[in-house]
Amino acid sequence: MPAGQVGSRCGQNTCRHRVAATATRLDPQAQVVTLDDETELPYDNVLIATGSSPVRPPLPGVDGAGVHSFWTLEQAEGVIANVHEGSHVAMVGAGFIDFTILTAILARGASLTVVEIAPQILPRMIDQEGAALVQQWLMDRGVTIRTNAQLSAIEDAGAQKRLRFQQGDDVVADTVIMATGIRTNLDWLEGSGITIDQGVVVDAQLRTNVPNVYAAGDIAEGPDLITGEGAVHAIEPTAMEHGRVAGANMAGQPQAYRGSLLMNIVEVLGLEIASFGAWNDTEADVDQAIKSEGPAYRKLLWRGDRLIGAMILGPSKDIWTTNDVGMLKGLVQTGTPLGEWKAYLRQHPFEIKRAYIASGTTARLLPLTVQGSPSVPAATVAAQ
Ligand SMILES: Cc1cc2nc3c(=O)[nH]c(=O)nc-3n(C[C@H](O)[C@H](O)[C@H](O)COP(=O)(O)OP(=O)(O)OC[C@H]3O[C@@H](n4cnc5c(N)ncnc54)[C@H](O)[C@@H]3O)c2cc1C
């Protein structure tokens, strides 16, 4: 559909959609959204789902040519066009986004330097012990990693880029990828009276402080499954759950949900890394176990006999890494009381499956949908 066009019917309901149109104002009292061409869209209910955008530190040269973000399709195409056999790529920020593309960068034949301001890589996803294992895994495969690296400027160096740091040697690269964090796209809500903290604050129905204004996805600070408090997860599963709960409520089917589980799962060069729930809770009882062969790492965080968080790391070709990722997620998500199996897991942290099966976690997991209503078999839905 050409940019800006309005139209189309969706099923039995009349849907109108506008592309290439930016919402610039929300007026909850008048119940109107204003677009950048001053079009006013009146509404009965409105959903704020404007997501998040990458942010770069305010340093000289960070917005220059050859310095890329990796967020939109256009930006991804810009990176692909510049990464090829023999080129050198510098990634600034060793977080989740960089790690989702790291394997693909190397597969194009480029060499790679990762620089991170924190003392460890993946600081918002795994602990120091796990980060040390991942760092060694990457260095063994030719990736250069610098932590505690505070970038001060990016300069032109002929056709290349020179990264300067507050301390230590410069890094010279053909392409620079900045993945230094995100911010929620909140600007257009200024003056709307919608309560904002880290994101748009919503309740268990995904409703804001204004009853007919909802928010979902990266922009929403919704209930966290483990803590029950508001959190901005900025991950796809949470966005999907928010959308379903908000959609049901906006359609007049009241639904509350317990909250979403924070989870991050990424694979780099054959190493699977995942964390769930309150993986960095400093008040939890913690069990850790590392096997240097593999390597493999399991971290279990307990409240009473329930797992409230977990971390796992291991080669993705090892079937027990993949299986344990799913089972640990299930154990944390259901909060299954593990009784005597807690002692077993504390002694055998790599034997997740026995505790998972014996505790009946699958049976707890399967029957419930995100909205808390019983799941319906696909055949029943198809027959309806
Ligand atoms: C490279 C990358 C890899 C990722 N990998 C994973 C992963 O492996 N697993 C995972 O769980 N999550 C991942 N994520 C995060 C995931 O994509 C987001 O959590 C998810 O897309 C959030 O959905 P959303 O609908 O809230 O926001 P978005 O998908 O960002 O959609 C928001 C939309 O609103 C539009 N918009 C913004 N402002 C306005 C405005 N004022 N008016 C009109 N429209 C506006 C934007 O253009 C955008 O189309 C990744 C993200 C990136 C960038």
Image: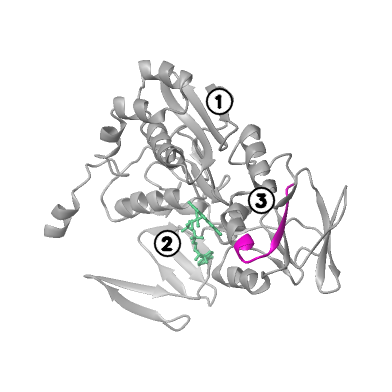
- Residue 352's quadrant in the figure? top left
Dot placed on the residue nearer the N-terminal end, 3 or 2: 2
Q: Report the quarter where the N terminus lies.
A: bottom left
Task: Answer left or right for 298 relative to 143.
Answer: left
Please indicate, yes or no, whether residue 71 appears anywhere in the rendered image: yes
Residue position for label 2: 31
Give the extent of the magenta segment: 105-116
Magenta stretch encompasses residue 111: yes
Kind of residue at disc 2: Gln
Of tags 3 and 1, the one toward the viewer is 3
Q: Residue furthest left?
A: 383
Q: Residue furthest bottom?
A: 2
Task: Indicate the secondary structure of the residue bearing disc 1.
Answer: strand
Magenta stretch encompasses residue 108: yes
Label disc, if present, on residue 288 of the rendered structure: 1
Of tags 3 and 2, the one toward the viewer is 3
Q: Position of residue 277 (x, y in %)?
A: 48, 35
Any atom of ligand 1 within 8 Å of the CB at mark 1?
A: no
Residue position for label 3: 141
Kind of residue at disc 3: Arg
